[in-house]
Image (tube, rainbow, N blue to C red):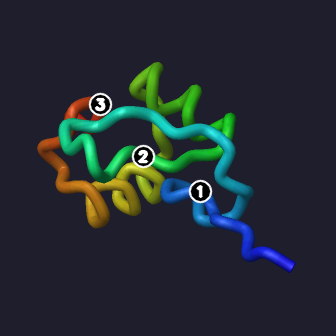
Amino acid sequence: MGTTTLCEACQKNEMNVVESSDEPKQPYQLCYQCHERLLSYSLRPIEWYNLAVLHSPKQFLLPR
């Protein structure tokens, strides 16, 4: 049995989308719902925080 990678934003759903970030070696790994919210700049505060901790709040798609 393989391990399931969780979405970096919500940390609940299975990761199924990889989105480029400013750091090519560390793309965002998201579920479909969080990916849509990331692209529409509508992440929930905890989702934004989780991504900012992993990727830096100055990353592309993570404006405050």
Label 3, label 2: how far apart the Cα atoms are: 10 Å
Name the side, left or right, on which 44 lies relative to 13. left
Kindly identify the residue that appears in the image at 12 percent across and 44 percent down. 58
- Residue at image mark 3: 61
Give the residue at the far right of this rendering: 1
Residue flagged by tag 3: what amino acid is it? Answer: Leu
Q: Is disc 3 surrounded by few (<14), some (14 to 19) or many (20+) residues within 10 Å?
A: some
Name the side, left or right, on which 51 lies relative to 35. left
Q: Position of residue 50 (x, y in %)?
A: 40, 62
Q: Position of residue 8 (x, y in %)?
A: 50, 58
Q: Is residue 10 above or below residue 29?
A: below
On residue 28, which mark appears?
2
Q: Nearer the viewer, residue 64 or 14?
A: 14
Mark nearer the N terminus (1 vs 3) = 1
Mark nearer the N terminus (1 vs 2) = 1
- Residue at image mark 1: 7
Label 1, label 2: how far apart the Cα atoms are: 9 Å
Q: Nearer the viewer, residue 35 or 20?
A: 20
